[in-house]
Image (spheres, helix red, strand yellow):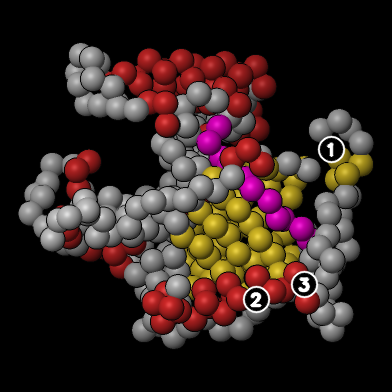
Amino acid sequence: MIARCFLNVWSCTGAVLIAIGVAEVSAQLPPASNRPVSTASPTGTTWTPPRTPWGDPDLQGTYTNKYETSTPFERPKEFEGRRLKDVTRDELVSAVKKRQQDTLARAKFFGGDPEGLIGNSAEFRDIYEIERGSRPWFVIDPIDGQIPPILPEARARIAGERRPTGSFGTGPLNSPEDFSLWERCITRGFPASMLPGQYGNSYEIVQAPGFVAIRYEMVHDTRVIPLTRGPHAGTAITFDMGDARGHWEGDTLVVETTNFKARSAYRNANPATLRLVERFTRSAPDKVEWKVTVEDPSTWARPWTFAIPLTMNDSEAVLEYACHEGNRESGTS
């Protein structure tokens, strides 16, 4: 904990404030900018998003997006030429059913054995509730569901960078630096830490006056987001999860994140120009809509946005991710 304090002042300060903030709700703090907006619930009745004791929209809870582990990030060929709003409910039901069947059929090959005789612990993977998925694909802007083209100069920059592929690629594997940050138990980076993966798809949102904290099961990361329109850290200070600043727009939490490290910048973006804008909106008693707009004028031809639903589920509590760089068997040197 002490070591992490030196790495990120907000993480330390925020962690203390999150621990004591709820117990010390201050009447001097201003309420959220707008009143609650009533929305229609799935049952057709009027539902008003809850508020914290100090007046902010209440996003707190344990969430998962494991139901979307097989949802394509971009529009798949099966929906070629279609827009999200054109996909019918029956088509979506059919698509997620097929994704479930295909995933289970592939499970016996997870161990890398082409004959499927050697499994790879399929049971711990989030592959059994894919039929609860609710999206045809994730990219919502542009409307064609495709990530905009990478600029020629960005392609040249990326080609000249060393990006280790680790055991998921072709090597080399001569040193720890040849493995990915995920394999080394350092981080998945951001926003990758909240994208559905093969396991560990649990998150917890905690709030206190002036702060929102988000815990990610994989890889044991926590973002502490100060609610301020103040400036970001200086450009010389960078983080794998970036430097976040949040504010409320009605019932939506808007978080702007910059100051990324080059080694973990999302999709090979330029860390000096990458800006991510998240929007968290409580859309139902058990749902939060998470939207992320990716802006990097030196990498992509235009900004683009993806959206993923988070489902509140207390049975999917964030568990210890018992993994850290330097793990070794006891008794070894």
In primary-sequence order, the first of circles 2 and 3 is 2
Height in image: 282 above or below 222?
above
Position of residue 231 in the picture relative to residue 99 (left or right): right
Q: Which residue is at a point 31% across and 18% down the rendered structure image?
A: 108
Structural crowding at the residue carrying mark 2, measured as other residues with C-alpha within 10 Å and reported as few (<14), some (14–19) or many (≥20): many
In which quadrant of the rendered image does the C terminus lie?
bottom left
Where residue 183 appears, x then y in whole percent? Answer: 28, 50
**Residue that carries the numbered disc 1 in the rendered image:** 41
Q: From mark 2 to mark 1, how far is it between C-alphas?
A: 33 Å
**Residue that carries the numbered disc 2 in the rendered image:** 17
Structural crowding at the residue carrying mark 1, measured as other residues with C-alpha within 10 Å and reported as few (<14), some (14–19) or many (≥20): few
Q: Are marks 2 and 3 in contact (CB under 8 Å)?
A: no
- Going by the numbered disc 3, the residue's amino acid type is Ala
Where residue 174 appears, x then y in whole percent? Answer: 7, 54
Q: Which residue is at a point 38% across and 26% down the rendered structure image?
A: 122
Q: From mark 3 to mark 1, how far is it between C-alphas?
A: 31 Å
- Going by the numbered disc 1, the residue's amino acid type is Ser
Tell which residue pokes out farthest to the front in this image: 331
Where residue 47 appears, x then y in whole percent? Answer: 88, 44
Position of residue 149 in the picture relative to residue 314 (left or right): left
Q: Point out the frontmost of discs 3 and 1.
A: 3
Q: Do the residues labelled 2 and 1 touch (CB within 8 Å)?
A: no
Check if residue 60 falls in the magenta segment: yes
Q: Do the residues labelled 3 and 1 touch (CB within 8 Å)?
A: no
In primary-sequence order, the first of circles 3 and 1 is 3
Q: What stretch is highlighted in magenta?
A: 57-67
**Residue that carries the numbered disc 3 in the rendered image:** 23
In which quadrant of the rendered image does the N terminus lie?
bottom left
